[in-house]
């Protein structure tokens, strides 16, 4: 009842539809999945398991992106900003589809906790949205900066690096990173406020918990 008092019913129905599609329907990308021509991917069993665990985390990130942008589109009073959030959500659907497809190719499943991840991200989006457009955009900017740094870790040397031979996953991650940087820049240009350092740290901590759990569950 309270939700109907705060938001028009069509926006609530749209938010519900997005949640159901994200969690229970095979996503379809508007753009073709990135590939590296003439570089076939041949992985050992160990490399395949590593790629699957990392791409599962990235898929969870896209589930959360759908929830976050949908909640922020629901809460903002600005039609222009609502369109920006909605468009970003559509673009993130490509990422959702690409990571889901890659998981299937690797013989792996998505996280069993996706409904929980979605609910948590949606709740955060609602809170951020109710704090005003500048804070909501600031949350988007900081989130996308942290996500792009996370994705860079898959492409660089380190403990979370995708196998060098996994050209397919690396091409997907590289394109995702470019898109996330663009979303952060768009949020900044639209008037994002810089979040307090303690909030940024809490976001990094929450992301670390999510990535650690999603690699396994």
Image (tube, helix red, strand yellow):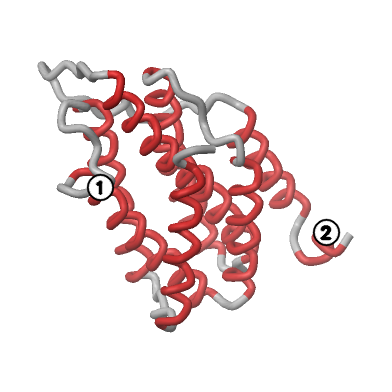
Q: Which mark is residue 4?
A: 2
Taking the image as shown, residue 84 lies to the left or right of residue 114, namely left
Q: Nearer the viewer, mark 1 or mark 2?
A: 1
**Quadrant position of residue 40:** top left
Q: Nearer the viewer, residue 154 or 98?
A: 154
Q: Nearer the N terminus, badge 1 or badge 2?
A: 2
Q: Which residue is mark 1?
A: 159
Residue depicted at x 89% and y 59%? 1
Residue depicted at x 67% and y 36%? 20
User: Within 10 angstroms of label 1, few (less than 14), some, or many (20 or more) residues?
Assistant: few
Residue depicted at x 58% and y 36%? 22
* Residue 154 visible at all: yes
* Residue 178 visible at all: no
Element class at badge 2: helix
Q: Are marks 1 and 2 in contact (CB under 8 Å)?
A: no
How far across and down, in percent of the image, does residue 105 sit?
Answer: 38, 18
- Disc 1 and disc 2: Cα gap in Å? 47 Å
Residue 23 lies, with reference to residue 65, above or below; the image says: above
User: Within 10 angstroms of label 2, few (less than 14), some, or many (20 or more) residues?
Assistant: few
Q: Which mark is residue 133?
A: none
């Amino acid at each position: 009842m309270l939700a109907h008092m705060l938001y028009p019913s069509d926006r609530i129905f749209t938010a519900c539809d997005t949640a159901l599609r994200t969690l229970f329907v095979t996503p379809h990308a508007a753009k073709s999945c990135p590939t590296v021509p003439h570089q076939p991917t041949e992985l050992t069993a160990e490399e395949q398991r590593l790629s699957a665990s990392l791409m599962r985390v990235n898929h969870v990130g896209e589930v959360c992106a759908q929830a976050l942008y949908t909640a922020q589109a629901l809460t903002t009073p600005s039609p222009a900003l609502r369109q920006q959030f909605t468009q970003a959500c559509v673009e993130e659907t490509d990422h959702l589809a690409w990571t889901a497809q890659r998981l299937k190719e690797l013989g792996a499943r998505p996280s069993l906790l996706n409904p929980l991840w979605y609910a948590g991200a949606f709740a955060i989006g609602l809170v951020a949205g109710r704090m005003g457009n500048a804070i909501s955009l600031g949350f988007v900017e900081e989130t996308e900066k942290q996500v792009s740094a996370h994705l860079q870790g898959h492409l660089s040397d380190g403990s979370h690096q995708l196998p060098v031979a996994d050209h397919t996953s690396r091409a997907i991650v590289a394109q995702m990173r470019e898109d996330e940087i663009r979303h952060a820049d768009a949020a900044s240009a639209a008037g994002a406020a810089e979040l307090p350092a303690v909030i940024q740290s809490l976001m990094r901590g929450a992301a670390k918990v999510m990535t650690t759990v999603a690699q396994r569950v």
